[in-house]
Image: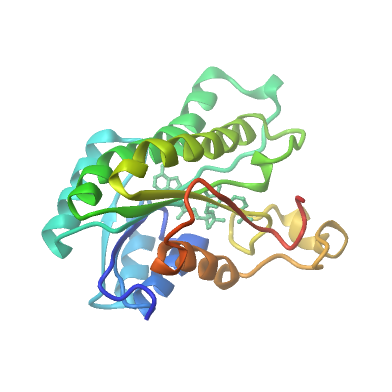
Amino acid sequence: MKLEGKVAIVTGAGSGMGAEEARMMAAEGAKVVVTDINVESARKVAQDIGDSAIYLEQDVADEAGWTRVVEATLAQFGKIDILVNNAGMTRSEKLQDTDAAFMRRMLDVNVVGSFLGMRATMEPMRRNGGGVVINIASGLAFTSLPGYFAYGASKWAVRGMTRLASKDLAEYNIRVVTVTPGAIDTPALVPAVRENAKTMIPLGRAGGVDEFARVVVFIASDDASYISGAEIMVDGAMIC
Ligand SMILES: NC(=O)c1ccc[n+]([C@@H]2O[C@H](COP(=O)([O-])OP(=O)(O)OC[C@H]3O[C@@H](n4cnc5c(N)ncnc54)[C@H](O)[C@@H]3O)[C@@H](O)[C@H]2O)c1
C-alpha cells in the first residue's frame, strides 16, 4: 500500500494510461478523483474502482473548471496530495497545416491545462505540508519528429514548465516531475508505431499501461521523496 491515506487527482483518466494510473493508485490505498472531458468514460473508470474514487467532468483548459475540481476534491476527501496532469491532445500536423486556432487549443490543453492544475492545487498542497505533481510529456519532447509541430512544441513546453515549477514550488515541499511515455499501448498510440514496434523500439514492443502506471505510482509515493524536477523516461530505449 504505497499510497495509503493519499488523495490524488488524475486528469484524462477516462482512458489509457490515466485510467490505469487511477486504478493502480486506488489499489495502493489512495482516494482518487477521476476527471475527463468525456464524462461517460470517467464515470465508468470511477465506478469500476468503487468507493475510493469519484468522477468529475473537466476540460483541463478551463480555469473555472479547475476551481470546481479542487473544491469537489476537498469536499469529498479533505485534502490533495497528488496531481497527475495526464490529459492530453494528440494530433499530427505539419507547421504548414497548423492554423492559429489549432495551435492555441493544443497549447491550452497540453500546457495551460497543466499550468492551471498546478496553480489550483498548490495552495491545498502547501496547507497540507506538501505534495507531488506529475506532468506527462512525450518522447516528442526530446526529439523533433516531422509532422508533429503543435503537439511536439506543447510537450517540449511541458518539460520546461516542470523544471521551472520544481524550483518555485520546492518552498512548499511540492515535488514536480515529468514522466515521459515513449510508445504505450493506448487508443492514442499511432498505429504505425504499434505495427512496427519490433524495428522502432529496442525492447521490441510498445509498453503496457501497467508498466507506465507503476512508474507514476512510484513517483507519487514517499519512496520518491527526493525526486523533483527530474524527467523519467518510460520508453523501452526508443528515445535515448
Ligand atoms: N500512448 C502513448 O504512447 C503516448 C505517448 C506520448 C505521450 N502520451 C501522452 O500521455 C497522456 C495520456 O495519453 P493516452 O495515450 O493514455 O491517451 P488516451 O487517448 O487513451 O487518453 C487521453 C484522455 O484524455 C482526455 N482528454 C483529452 N482532452 C482533454 C481535455 N481538454 N480535458 C480533459 N481530458 C481530456 C481524453 O478524453 C482521454 O480520455 C497524454 O498527455 C498523451 O499526450 C501518450
Using residue 132 as the reference point, say whether residue 146 is left or right of it: right
Residue 192 is left or right of residue 101, and the answer is right
Residue 96, by quadrant, is: top right
Can you give x and y, in whole percent of width and height, for residue 238 in the image? 77, 55
Q: Tag count in the figure?
A: 0
Is residue 18 or residue 175 the one in the foreground?
A: 175
The residue furthest left is 75
Q: Quadrant of residue 51?
A: bottom left
| Rendered view: 27 above or below 70 | below
User: Residue placed farthest to the right in the image?
Assistant: 199
Q: Is residue 176 visible?
A: yes
Q: Residue at x 61, y 39 (%)?
A: 91
| Left or right, 96 with reference to 62 | right
**Which image quarter holds the N terminus?**
bottom left
Frontmost residue, 197 versus 132: 132
Residue drawn at the location 52% of the way across and 71% of the way down: 214
Which residue is at a point 62% across and 70% down the rendered structure image?
Answer: 208
Instruction: Tell me if residue 117 can be seen.
Output: no
How was this image coloured?
rainbow
In percent of width and height, residue 164 lies at 46, 34
Between residue 157 and residue 55, name the one nearer to us: 157
Q: Is residue 207 left or right of residue 107?
A: right
